Image: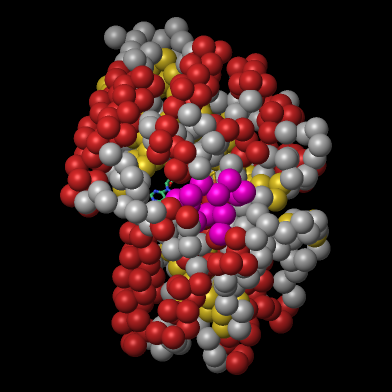
Amino acid sequence: MVLPNINEAKKRTKNKVKFIYDEYNITSDMKIGTGKTYYIKTYGCQMNEHDTELLSAILEDMNFTKANNMENADLILLNTCAIRENAHNKVFGMLGRIKHLKETKKDIIVGLCGCMAQEESVALNIKNKYKWVDLVFGTHNIHKLPDLLIESQNKKHQEIEVYSIEGDIIENLPYKRANKYKAWVNIMYGCDKFCTYCIVPYTRGKQRSRKKEDILKEINDLIKDGVQEITLLGQNVNAYGKDLYDDYKMENLLEDVAKINIPRIRFVTSHPWDFTDNMIEVIAKYKNVMPFIHLPVQSGSNKILKLMGRRYTKEEYITLFNKIKEKIPNASITTDIIVGFPGETEEDFNETIELVNTCKFDLAYTFIYSPREGTPASKMEDKVSIEEKSHRLETLNELINKYAKKSNDKLLNKIVPVLIEGISEKNDNILTGYTDTNKLVNVVGDKDNIGKIIDVKITDVKTWSLDGEEYIKNKCHN
Ligand code: 5AD
Ligand code: SF4
């Protein structure tokens, strides 16, 4: 049994990261899934979604097949998120449901992984009060799933293996991509920014960049499989390379990726601190780098930004924002905002409102601050009542929605490129896809367009999505 420890997780060792190319190997005696099914419930961010693609591929390599619902599965994995309290509550609620299921189906195997598993208090809670959970593993040893699963089955005991110190970079891992036309590509793991509210540097470990040649190879292989859009993925992608190269940065990687013949490239998430002018130049220069930037601001108050350890001021953020808009006029810029951070006064909150009025974001993800055990902010004095925080969130959301609708309004009657991903879940006659600026569009058009980027004329505009019809040049459009 290996339990996590927050003091270890905080450490940033000088150990050189090793790149390992031949670690993953499923031998015939590891194929214990024949005739069995799996179900993975994923919580949280794109990094977790992508990890689920890895977990799925590993399980399928072990001969498990995907179950269409949890009730039918022989193996249930919860790939968890630790970023806010409500993510925690959802997982413990789900464990309650699974416990009932396990009472009627004794043989099902239950595992918990992802960021919550990295938290000492969660791992201990599972060890002491959820003894029926068969398997707990963290974010640093996902590729070890076959060994852990086999071990827990053979020994019929609870297997907990969560490392606090990150491991090496394991290459040549399999992924079962959820989308045929869009793919995530990890360019780095972990985060060294240690924003004072954030648990990620503890659950995902120190920043480790993948080698550029491994990233480029993965992308080239994806293109051969027909992928149209790739998203370069990391907690703080703009810091790419800092831990690995002297003179190769995110802007260089982005340019090298842009030179590959792939129609669409995106990247998430950017920290404003590392967003260089050269980055902006590269985005502006290459048509296949999408004019879409997710640039979390978190707060509009310099006092709060300082307490958050964000390393920029409101003025610096606005300068960067304006620079991007100037060089890439059609860029869609979205953000994340936290309300109710410890010490946030009405005045501080009003400064956030002011910033939103200045930037008029295309979209924003807004959250009430949630104290995370072990982070510096969780020890700060927090005098704001939950009612006040909820009220601030409501006020902010109203404003965010107003600007989201306004930014969509600008597209009415315009012709925009849309990557058609599939058929709408609500209506068989409607296709769905995303614009270059990452806006969801419901499209009336030919099903043959699935997997293609087509011109769409926007016919109606809502807050969260657009409606449109396939636009064919020289055809009579009434
Ligand atoms: N409480 C509330 N929101 C948080 N986020 C990160 N940590 C917390 C927390 N403790 C938000 C930030 C981040 C997004 C992914 O989640 O806005 O950008
Ligand atoms: Fe968390 Fe800050 Fe790192 Fe983002 S940059 S993952 S908010 S510590």
Residue under the point 21% across and 35% down: 395
Q: Position of residue 213 (x, y in %)?
A: 80, 42
Name the residue nearer the viewer: 312 or 114.
Answer: 312
Name the residue nearer the viewer: 164 or 405.
Answer: 164
Principal secondary structure, stretch drawn in magenta:
loop
**Seen in the image, is 340 located left or right of residue 472?**
left
Vertical position of residue 215 compared to residue 33: above or below: above
**Start and end of the magenta stretch?**
191-202
Vertical position of residue 69 compared to residue 265: above or below: below
Residue 196 lies in the magenta-colored region: yes
Q: Position of residue 392 (x, y in %)?
A: 23, 39
Residue 147, image quadrant: bottom right
Residue under the point 38% across and 32% down: 301
Q: Is residue 162 visible?
A: yes
Q: Position of residue 191 (x, y in %)?
A: 60, 49
Q: Position of residue 321 (x, y in %)?
A: 48, 21
Quarter holding the C terminus?
A: top left
Name the residue nearer the viewer: 25 or 425.
Answer: 25
Residue under the point 60% across and 60% down: 10
Residue 107 lies in the magenta-colored region: no
